[in-house]
Image (tube, rainbow, N blue to C red):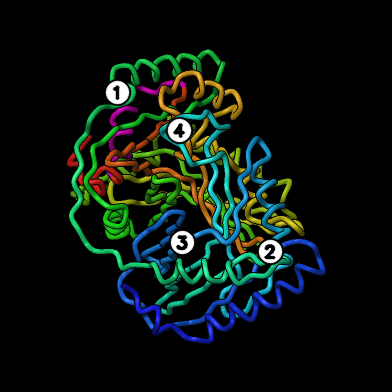
Amino acid sequence: MPRVTALPAQLLRGLADLARRARAASVRGGSPVLVWASTRVEPLGLPWTLTSPGWVWAKPARGLAVWASGEAWAAEVSGAGRFSEAARAWRRVAQGALWEGPLAPVAFAGFAFDAWRGTELWEGFPEGVVAVPRVLRARIRGSEYLAVGCLVGPEGGGDEVERTLQVLEGAEEASPEATWGQVLRQLPSPERWMAEVERAEAACRAGVLRKVVLARCVEVAVRATPDAVLRRLQDRYATCTVFAVARAGAVFLGASPERLAWVRRGRVATQALAGTAPRSALPREDQRLRAQLQESAKEAHEHELVAGHVWDALRPLCVALHQGRRGVVVLPDLQHLRTPFRGRLTDGVGILEVGGRLHPTPAVAGLPVQAATRWIRQHEPVPRGWYAGTVGWVDACGAGELSVAIRSALLREGRGWAFSGCGVVAGSQPLREYQESQLKLRAVLEALGVEGP
């Protein structure tokens, strides 16, 4: 158990004092007020176990690890405008917040890939949600911070403060343990999925689509805690964004190599990530595979479709935009073509508005985006839910980061559903696309303790 009683008393006193001030502000304004207190603390020991509702956001190679639990405030959103709706809801709360300490108030956000198709599998995961945790623990480049928050209305905040302290006192250290998993079935079957690839390739050749991304799912029997799976992902995929969202008895987690967007002080950075090749343990063969990726007309075509979409989506939001040179990003199992973008945003545009313009990218949907999304709805047997959606965080100024929720799985009651997808264009070969999807599944299946799909 973490030593809650040893935490700085001024943090808890600060929360109580802010709650008293917030009550008066709420009476004057007629709306609840978010309060948020934070402080730097001595290292708190092992990571804390993920609880529901809760979030994990980690970039191991950059020394960043964030754990969050409880909900001080949350808003569920839906429909095509859900990113903008989430931005407006958060802005209203953030503008009136009372806070003190080194960490400004922060909200976590998650969005489904597409308009919701209600299924038991994704129960508890809405089309979109933005939420402020009650307790946040952050390790940033060797320094550790703790923040606590709650929402205070005109009737007073004593109960809300107490609920936040209960979340803090209930935090437990994550215990290390082994993971085990066994594949139960593939959805759809390999033969059916490759037939869908063939059908999609014919549609691209006929000009009905330029590209469509087809996903598949592997259902797994799992004997592992989310904490253990996250630890394995962080150990092996340190250069990725390792994330987790716990809701309604389920956990959605993964190690994403793809940043959707990053915003800070009016600046935006993003990337086009599409075009894939395997890795090899032999340096010469690995280099040959990389050169083959860079010289492939098919992979270059798929990549340029994504890069063009990113430029077209960002340009209306920016007063200046720059596209960098195409290169290769190297991961433990795969390598991808990558083109970076940087720009200066117009006033008032934050990370959630940027996310709404970029999502879904052709890297997870296809082109034209709406036509490809319709194709996906009609042909994929397992609803994607939050797979290939967006997860991330936003601060009180609209700065933040969003990642594309790929290389991911949903865990629920001893079962796991791991997802992967491949971009199909004219000339795609079904067997090759299936083999690529197997490679993309490897990251999360290995973390679940599965030797292979």
Give yes or no for contact between labels 3 and 1 (Cβ–Cβ under 8 Å): no
**Neighbour tally class for label 3: few under 14, some 14-19, many 20 plus, Cα within 10 Å:** many
Name the disc covering residue 384, or none.
4
Vertical relation: 332 (above or below) 123: below
Residue beneath label 1, please?
431
Give yes or no for contact between labels 4 and 3 (Cβ–Cβ under 8 Å): no
Name the disc covering residue 255, or none.
none
Which residue is at 53% across, 48% downward?
110
Q: Quadrant of the N terminus?
A: bottom left
Q: Please, what secondary structure does the residue beneath circle 1 have?
A: helix
Looking at the rendered image, the disc whose residue lies closer to the viewer, 2 or 3, is: 3
Residue beneath label 3, please?
69
| Front residue (pair 214, 315) | 214
> What amino acid type is highlighted by mark number 4?
Arg
Residue beneath label 2, please?
94
**Neighbour tally class for label 2: few under 14, some 14-19, many 20 plus, Cα within 10 Å:** many
Q: Residues under labels 4 and 1: Cα distance?
A: 22 Å
Q: Residues under labels 2 and 4: Cα distance?
A: 31 Å
